[in-house]
Amino acid sequence: MVNSNTSALGIVFPNSYDVLVPDLVNVRLMASIPFASRYRLIDFILSSMAHCDIDNIAVMVNNNYHSLMDHLGSGREWDLVRKNGGLHIFPPFVEKGVKPYTGRVGAVASILGFLRNQKEKYVVLTDTNIVVNFDFNALIEAHIESGADVTMAYNEQEIPAGMMKIEESGLTYYYTLGIEDGRVSQIYVNSQKTGIQNLSMNMFVLEREKLIEMINTASVRGQIYFERDVLMPQLNKLNIRAYKYDGYVARICDMKSYFDENMKLLDDHNLDALFSGKQIYTKIRDDNPTRYIEGAKVQNVMVADGCVIEGEVEDSILFRGVKVAKGAKVKNCILMQDTVIEAGADVEYLVMDKNVTVSAGKSMRGTDTFPVYIGKHQTV
Amino acid sequence: MAKEMIAMLLAGGQGSRLYALTEKLAKPAVPFGGKYRIIDFPLSNCVNSGIDTVGILTQYQPLVLNEYIGNGQPWDLDRLYGGVHVLPPYQKASGSDWYKGTANAIYQNISFIERYDPEYVIILSGDQICKQDYSDFLKFHKEKNAEFSVAVMEVPWEEASRFGLMVADGDDRITEFQEKPKNPKSNLASMGIYIFNWDILKKYLEEDEADPNSENDFGNNIIPNLLRDNRRMYAYHFDGYWKDVGTISSLWEANMEILDPEHSGINLFDEDWKIYSRNSGMTGHKISAGALVENSMITDGCRVKGEVKHSILFAGVRVEEGAVVEDAVVMGGTVIKSGAVVKHCIVAENVTVGENAVVGAMPTEEEKGVATIGEGVTIGDNAKVGPKAMVRKNVEGGGEEW
């Protein structure tokens, strides 16, 4: 039931920051990038929302979204099959002479009709390149208590190197916040400052009616980016509050951070910090348990179900259905679903996409600062 | 719209020979093979064989089983017409009855079966580990123009007298049934899986119900009655993996056999015949630096810091530093604390084995047995549980249980 005073609906932007990980989104989008041995990035957001009774969610797919559609299905695994609400996937609407949108404003503008017909009082907006076990209710409560027009979540950390590089490419934006007494007094675009910053998590909560009004106006003016074009010019006019998040945050902003954030979960403290809260749901594959055959040697690994390990694996993350044959050696690797490492092969510092095969006896190496990526369905 | 064949799954057995494991749950709900429960096998077989309507007959401790089955979605058995239905005994205007026997359980649900107007009914049992294509069985039944067929396994002659045996002629037509005979005339053991023409089954169920002296059992009453009337009864030979896991030792053995699919014939890594289950949803398992894992099956959510050899760990098991697990079946959520030694045993769900405690032992000439620890039990630090023990209650620190 929608409780009209506190309920919120969710709007998710699964293509945000695609440009930062061109290899990984070659066959997918940010939201469906595999993470932490059996999840996709969007699982963290959807599960967090589902646990906070946000069960009316719009996913604004824009580009390369077949893998995400396949992953989400009807939304059952996240308990999002509902008579009222549930999961809505909105593809872009394109016709002759009309280009698909590029920013949040255009995305939300394309579903204003939908938004007008909903009953929830609040809306939560979020990207998917951020891995969190997030309590949206705490964010909404803080928003209601402060009486703000918009509340945005941030965490205190250094700006990741992968984001700093955006300045050069100019392809997209990230935001840091100046905060006075909990109110956002400044929003900096693509800051190059070193040291701890108030880094925006690009998660917002505001009233649905307010969002409709803001987007309507912005859309008429041809504005594109919500933060840059809508919030920044209105910092004095609007009461925009900052909500500090102290929990575990992993940001995917280039191949290096993708590699590092996966590997960080080999440390139990990090794994517990991310997963000890509410359960993270994902698509079920009905794999059997992982089998370690005589001769297997494993040290410091995270392995999903459905693997068969006969060789040596060290400091690595294995997704579902990976096979490591006899005499093969795997070190510091991320092996996505159904990767096969044949007998005697020797690999180190690699990120292998789904269904990669490394032939018998072959050897391949990246380095700790530059993990080498191998595309889906490739045979080495 | 009529269904060609529906399945009735007998899941009411208490499984008293599983002792501590079935105190709080029915035998078909007993966990098996790392992430399954026994009932996943017949249910998955049904779906994989194209049977979309299954009645599950429950009676003993149905709570866990009911919750596990839910709406049947994990097995793709949430259907608009058909699907999976849990059928406990119920009260009628003329009084109520527990299920008095296997045949009576089906008898009491005749109206359920008739809703689907099936031509055939397959009777399954909820205490076997087996991957079987029931559509092959049905094909055989039709080809023989049979009224009743039973799936049989060839067993070694010296063991034949432990089973219910079908004596069949060269055309597989059954001529005699021997229940655990001293002098077996056949080595074809009944697997307890039957296909009936529904009209025949209904007729014999009604006749059986009217007989006050009947035990209302398929093996003891229905099959002998069919034979008496010279019905067209056939034996269908099945030569795949089949195991009745009704005892502690056979349950332990069957678990160990999935560690050796090349020889045992039970392969869970078969994309074409998946066994479905309700998943734990935990993260991938972790093997720490310094841990040792040999020849084992490990499920999502486990954390292994100690040694695990030739064992099966279910979802979320923790093996702390210096702990040793060997030849063991350790069910979901159990914690084995540092220095504990757990060997040749079955440890049920959510057990805590304290520091330096010892559970079970490798079999020797004098003493062999599969130690069993019941669900939720705590074994105190430095406690000792002997290889034949059946532990249902907490064992205090330093205590012993034999």
Image: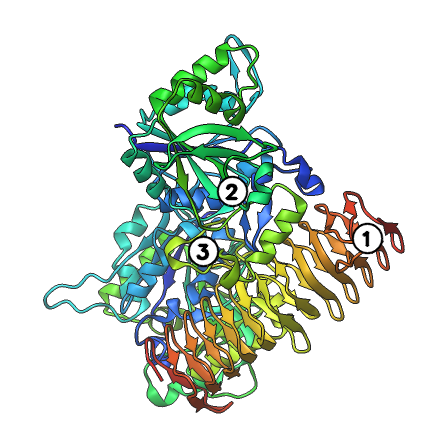
- Label 3: which residue? A286
On screen, residue B34 above or below A374: above
| Disc 2 secondary structure class | loop
Q: Residue at x 27, y 66 (%)?
A: A62
Q: Is residue A218 left or right of residue A35?
A: left
* 1 vs 3, front mark: 1
The reply to whether residue B314 is visible in this rendering is: no
Q: Residue at x 67, y 61 (%)?
A: B327
Q: Residue at x 37, y 47 (%)?
A: B48
Question: Where is residue B28 shown, x and y percent of the image?
Answer: 56, 40
The C terminus of chain A - image quarter: bottom left
Q: Is residue A67 left or right of residue A120?
A: left
Q: Marks 2 and 3: same chain?
A: no
- Label 2: which residue? B39
- Residue furthest toward the right? B398
- Residue furthest toward the left? A96
The reply to whether residue A328 is visible in this rendering is: yes
Q: Looking at the image, tell me whether mark 1 or mark 2 is earlier in sequence order.
A: 2
Amino acid type, callout 3: Asp
Q: Closer to the camera, B108 or A294?
A: A294
In the rendered structure, find residue B386 and report the number of the disc placed on it: 1
Real-space CA distance between mark 1 and mark 2, rounded to the nearest whole angstrom? 30 Å
Q: Is residue A295 left or right of residue B77?
A: right
Q: Closer to the camera, B400 or B121?
A: B121
- Callout 2: chain: B
